[in-house]
Amino acid sequence: MTERYLILEDGSVYKGTGFGAPAVTTGELVFNTSMTGYQEIITDQIYHNQIVIFTQPNIGSSGINQANYESILPSIKGVIVRELANVSTNRISRLSLDQYLKQMNIPGITGIDTRAVVKKLSKIGKTMKASIVPVPDDHAFDQLNATVLTNQQVAQVSTPKPYPNPGTGLSVVVIDFGLKHGILRELGRRNCNVTVLPYTASAEDILRLDPDGVVLSTGPGNPHDLRPSVLEMIQLIQTEIPLFAIGLGHELFAMANQAEVGKLPAEHHGMNHPIKEVITDHIIYASQGQGFAVDRQSVDRHRLFVTYIDLVNDTVQGLRHRNFPAFSVQFFPDGAPGPDETNGLFDEFIESMQRRGA
C-alpha cells in the first residue's frame, strides 16, 4: 500500500494509505452512517459519480460475497474509510474489499480522519467535489476544479434494453432509473413475473406488456435532469395501473403530480433514519439514500397526501395519490442494507394489484 491523498475543492488535503485500484478519481463527496452493509452501498447505483465516506470506523471485516450485490457493475467513484479490515472470517466471503475494488478499478483510502471530513461536510451544508490522488500538488487541484461531473447519471446506469426476471405470479414492469437488486429480490419473493424496462420507456411501451403494476426504481442524480417525457409517462400510467415509486422514483412521482423537489443541504445516507407513519404515528427506522426532497408545502392536497415524514429534518418520505392506486416512498423498503420492517410496502403493492384484477 502507498500514500494517497483525498483533496477537496475548498483546498483541504487529507493524507492516507491507498487500497483498491491505484486510479485517480473525482466525484461528489458524501458520507454514509450505516454500521453494516458496505458491499450493498458500494454496488448501489445511486452513488454514481460519488465518493463515499463511511462513518463506521472499521470497514471490510465481512469481505465480499455473492449474495449482497445491488448491481453487477458498480459506478461509485471511490471509498474512504478510517480503518480497513483486510482479513475476513465470514464463511461466505469470496473476496476481500481490497481485492474487489481492484477488480472494479475503484480506488480507496484508509487512515483518513473520517470524523473531520464528515464534520466539514455537515457544517458547510452542501456536497463538494473531491479527488483521490497520489500527489496533492497544484496540478491535482487544477484537475479537480476543472472537472465537470455529468448530470446524465440515469442514462449511464439504466439498462439499455428490456430484460425479464421471470416468475409465476402477477406481472410487474420495473422502470430502471438505477435499479437496486433488492427491489427485484422482494418482487421475486412474491413470485412476481418482472420485466425491467429502460428509463426511456413510454406509457405505450409499458401498456403494451399489459402489466398488473409498475414500479419506479431508485436511481442517482437530480430528478430535474430527466426529460419531461418521464413525467408524462408517470401521469398516464398512474391513471391506468397500480404504481409504486421508490427513491428517485418517489421524487419523479411527486413532480408528475405538481409537487416541487429541491436539493438537501446535506445528503442523507444510512440505515438509521427515524421515519414516522403519519396515519398511525408509528416510528420506523429505514435505509435511506437521499440528496433531494419533496417540498411539503408544495404538495397539492387535492391530488396527494403525505404518508411518511422524516423525524430528523421533517422532509416528506412518502406520498399517496387520492384518486389512483399509486404511492411512493423516499426510503428503501427493501433494506439492502438496513432494516426490513418496511418491506410490507411490497405486500401493499401486491394487494393493490390484486384488487385491480378482482
Image (cartoon, rainbow, N blue to C red):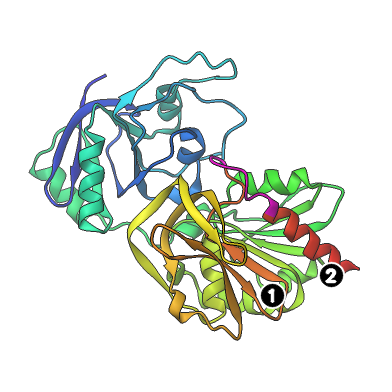
Query: Do tag 2 and tag 1 residues touch (Cβ < 8 Å)?
Result: no
Sequence order check, earlier mark of 2 and 1: 1
Give the magenta range: 336-344
Residue at the (46%, 81%) spot, across then down: 298
- Nearer to us in this view, 300 or 19: 300
Position in image of residue 227 (x %, y %): 50, 73
Q: Can residue 211 be seen at all in this image of the molecule?
A: no
- Does the stretch in magenta take in 334? no
- Does the stretch in magenta take in 337? yes
Q: Residue most toward the front?
A: 281
- Nearer to us in this view, 304 or 191: 304
Task: Identify the residue under disc 1.
Answer: 238
* Dot 2 crowding, Cα within 10 Å, few <14, some 14–19, many 20+: some
Instruction: Determine whether, in the image, residue 104 is placed left or right of residue 202.
Output: left
Task: Pick the quarter of the image with the C terminus.
Answer: bottom right
Position in image of residue 84 (x %, y %): 34, 23
Vertical side of 248 occupied by 96: above or below: above
Q: Residue most toward the left?
A: 138
Q: CA distance from mark 2 to mark 1?
A: 13 Å
Instruction: Determine whether, in the image, residue 40 is placed left or right of residue 181.
Output: left
* Dot 1 crowding, Cα within 10 Å, few <14, some 14–19, many 20+: many
- Nearer to us in this view, 46 or 319: 319
**To which quarter of the image does residue 54 belong?**
top left
- Nearer to us in this view, 292 or 13: 292
Which mark is drawn over residue 356?
A: 2
Instruction: Determine whether, in the image, residue 295 is placed left or right of residue 234.
Output: left
Task: Pick the quarter of the image with the N terminus.
Answer: top left
